[in-house]
Amino acid sequence: MMEQLPVIVSLDTVSRNKALAIAQSLSGRVWGYKVHRLIDRHGPEIVHMLKKFGKVFVDMKLADTPDTVRGRIKEWAAHNADLISVQGNLGADVLKAASSAGRDRAVAITQLTSDTDSSEVLRRARDAYQSGIRVVTCSAWEAAAVKTAHPSALIITPGIRAAGTPRHDQKRTATPAEAIREGADLLVIGRPITNAADPAAALEVLMQDVSVQ
């Protein structure tokens, strides 16, 4: 039996049918799948459908009042979402509300990897951690510093690309091996897998230099 890879496959650039086909082909091989725009198009049903093939990260980047964020996280938890994201720049009250609603599910977004400015990442990771959130996103460029400051934090790292391939809209990118070496726990990979003729084969090539513990 093959070991599960620490990968979250982002499925938002493909259709529902293709997303489900990819998820089925990678079932048991990856941690799970990330969705946002697919939810916009198909609602919570897509979460239930993907749960047949792995865990689901609902990347809604919630940004609202504490009560609203708390309620939204509880709603997505009721749909069996494993992780639900909230913007990490909204202050302690919102982050504490997110933590109280789903300490093991709430994910704080420190800074998008499409942004070149990473100066706020460490502060936002600290604010999230102090509010009780134990899962944060950051690029590989900041992963080592975040892990040093918060050793028990689970770090999710987007912007993963193979060496020498297009960055698309991502700015702070890294290869899978680089990200893991810097302290990332889970890697978000989208188009390098979903655009491939054979997603499973593309995954294996991308992760060939990564040692699974």
Image (cartoon, rainbow, N blue to C red):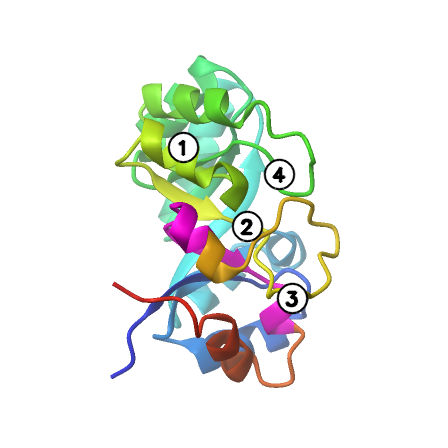
Question: Horizontal and vertical percent for residue 124?
Answer: 48, 23
Which corner quadrant of the image does residue 95 belong to? Answer: top left
- Pointer 4 residue: 112
Q: CA distance from mark 4 to mark 3?
A: 17 Å
Question: Horizontal and vertical percent for residue 121?
Answer: 52, 28
Question: Horizontal and vertical percent for residue 211?
Answer: 33, 67
Q: CA distance from mark 2 to mark 4?
A: 8 Å
Mark 2 and mark 4 in contact? Answer it, CB < 8 Å: yes
Mark 1 and mark 4 in contact? Answer it, CB < 8 Å: no
Q: Which residues are magenta?
A: 179-194
Earlier-in-chain disc, 2 versus 4: 4
Check residue 2 for magenta coloring: no
Q: Residue at x 30, y 66 (%)?
A: 212
Q: Secondary structure at mark 1?
A: helix
Q: Amino acid at mark 1?
A: Val
Marking on residue 158:
2
Marking on residue 191:
3
* Crowd band around label 3 with a 10 angstrom C-alpha radius: few (<14), some (14–19), many (20+): some
